[in-house]
Image: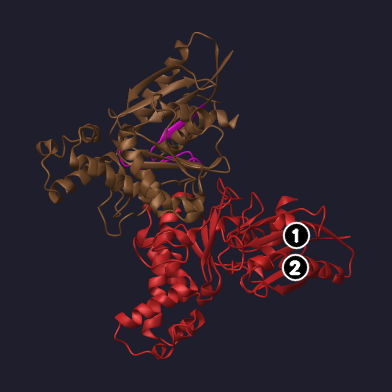
Chain colours: A brown, B red
Amino acid sequence: MKKLAFGIDIGGINTAFGLVDLEGNIAAESKISTKAYPKFSDYPKYVEALGVAMQSLLKEVKDEVELVGIGIGAPNANYYCGIIDRPVNLWKYTGEEESQDELNRVFDLVKDLGEYFPNVPIYITNDANAATIGEMVYGAAKGMKDFFMITLGTGVGSGFVSNGEMIYGHDGFAGEFGHVTVERNGRMCGCGKKGCLEAYASAIGIKRTAFELMASMPDASPLRDISYNELDSAMLSEAADKGDPIALEAFRLTGQRLGYAIADAAVITSPEAVFIFGGLAKAGEKLFKHIRYYMEEAILVTYKNKIKILPSGLQDKNVAILGGAALVWQKI
Amino acid sequence: MKKLAFGIDIGGINTAFGLVDLEGNIAAESKISTKAYPKFSDYPKYVEALGVAMQSLLKEVKDEVELVGIGIGAPNANYYCGIIDRPVNLWKYTGEEESQDELNRVFDLVKDLGEYFPNVPIYITNDANAATIGEMVYGAAKGMKDFFMITLGTGVGSGFVSNGEMIYGHDGFAGEFGHVTVERNGRMCGCGKKGCLEAYASAIGIKRTAFELMASMPDASPLRDISYNELDSAMLSEAADKGDPIALEAFRLTGQRLGYAIADAAVITSPEAVFIFGGLAKAGEKLFKHIRYYMEEAILVTYKNKIKILPSGLQDKNVAILGGAALVWQKI
């Protein structure tokens, strides 16, 4: 009997899931569209689609399988109470509902998915925490007891590990590093606050910086031919590789914000390493070198030259599926 | 046989120590002067004075005592390796030593004090961590698993607890919250950096703020008759109670810096409560109300109206002695 755990990664576009063994090998994987179920009232249909698709993936595995558990990484998910709490991009009100109270936009996915998998333990945590656990169990953080991970995607997520344990905090919502204030009264952030790290260091944040630089710098640049909606962080990365001064400066400023913010977080948790993950992290050294430089510039002397800034060890794998599964394997 | 633990609090002026039982009752206490041993070369004499004074306190206790351990809270102490690493105010070079390499100004107090107490386990941690453990074991944080403590004294110290455990970090030096940057290129801090929280929110920080305000505000105030060296935070607290506009504004600005910094720390650890301790914390609500207000203003919506800002439950007791002893009792 082959023991496998489901790892599920709920993103705004797709929900990817896979069956993972204790060593982190993915025996089978599949996905459904999340985007096809955008409305609040679509949620039950989404759960059904996911449950059915998972059951059929289970049947595809040739060996006889013991499903040891299901681990889910999802935006705004709470480890303690199993719910997804007012996710920004999922299952939104359309205006047709009787109530539009945001406090009701809470989804008990652990319970609801449990109806398709009776007696199987189900765990959930936010997507960045799942990635962090994946890194700890299967990736470059293996054996580390004190580190944190920053995910640079559409937003900025994070997971903090101390004494070898995830920091979930009192309410299960710890690790929202994207929302430290890096500029008092700075850029508007999606969360409603101003000046959050996410507004500067996410894939969208660096684009906002590039557009600010087009206004403040005189240099010619092919970027000036691209509209805001067209430009993405991969284009900025390519432009920087060709020496584009605006793109290079955008990476420097993004690394500076991250380096300074990491220096401040380090006095709290004193990590061995900080892992940088996600779409924007693919830019690699042209971002990382600035993070290191500004972190060292701003950090308390006690921590100088001690903290490693590293890429994820799971760049090419589906770390979120692995992280979800790791959440299960950690428990048993 | 009465089981007791020594708790030791090493301050810049005095070293206080006491014998504490499991319930936090202090059976006997005493102190020696730290200030009498200011030089690097005084350190061995200091250890001798401390060891001898502790031995004689032990003899004073009438019951037969089993000494279960010794717990020390000291500036710049490292929990993992037992040393005190380049303390700012202790055992300094005078210029007469052959070497003045700061890297050698490291004191292995666990080993050295151990010569007076063979076979007794000795633990050390930094003073703010010791106070935090005292709060957790004997104070208002009893039963809390996620909280942190900020000590507002000459400097700003802190201790973070997550999942019921102290966060020591990879190197044992975690929890230096006084050195988060609250103002880029701001005031010079004692650590050599600029703009640290400590330069604004310590007893000296609020004095610096008051002097800045004397320059920027036109209001008459009796504070204008007091020199910088004479003024202390207790005077500012009294002046604020009498409605002095400069003192009131100094407390508001200090609470603002603390509130904003706590809002940023909260996204990392999501605490149930934050305890404010130390000399400046005695100002009470006239500081606390501003901390709460600005924390709520700046905090991510996820944590709004969840985090308690509280005074220590051990205000009138020697929390550092209790904290040192708690370090021992936690272990056994």
Magenta region includes residue A129:
no
Q: Output the chain of dot 1.
A: B
Whether residue A85 appears in magenta in the rendering, the answer is yes
Q: Which residues are magenta?
A: A70-90
**Which chain's residue wears label 2?**
B
Which residue position is annotated with label 2?
Answer: B50
Q: Position of residue A112 (x, y in %)?
A: 44, 31
Give the Cα separation between the discs numbered 2 and 1. Answer: 8 Å
Local secondary structure at mark 1: helix
- Rate crowding at label 1 as few (under 14), some (14 to 19) or many (20 or more) other CA atoms within 10 Å: some
**Contact, CB < 8 Å: mark 2 with mark 1?**
yes
User: Is residue B129 found left or right of A257 in the rendered image?
Assistant: right
Q: Earlier in the sequence, mark 2 or mark 1?
A: 2
Q: Position of residue B169 (x, y in %)?
A: 55, 48
What residue sits right under mark 1 in the picture?
B113
Whether labels 2 and 1 belong to a single chain: the reply is yes
A11 or A134, nearer to the observer: A134
In the figure, residue B246 lies in which quadrant?
A: bottom left
**Image coordinates for residue A144, horizontal then vertical, percent:** 55, 37
Rendered residue at 69%/65% (across/down): B43
Q: Is residue B102 left or right of residue B116?
A: left
Kindly identify the amino acid type of the residue bearing the numbered disc 1.
Leu
Circle 2 — which element? helix
Q: Nearer the viewer, residue A205 or A173?
A: A205
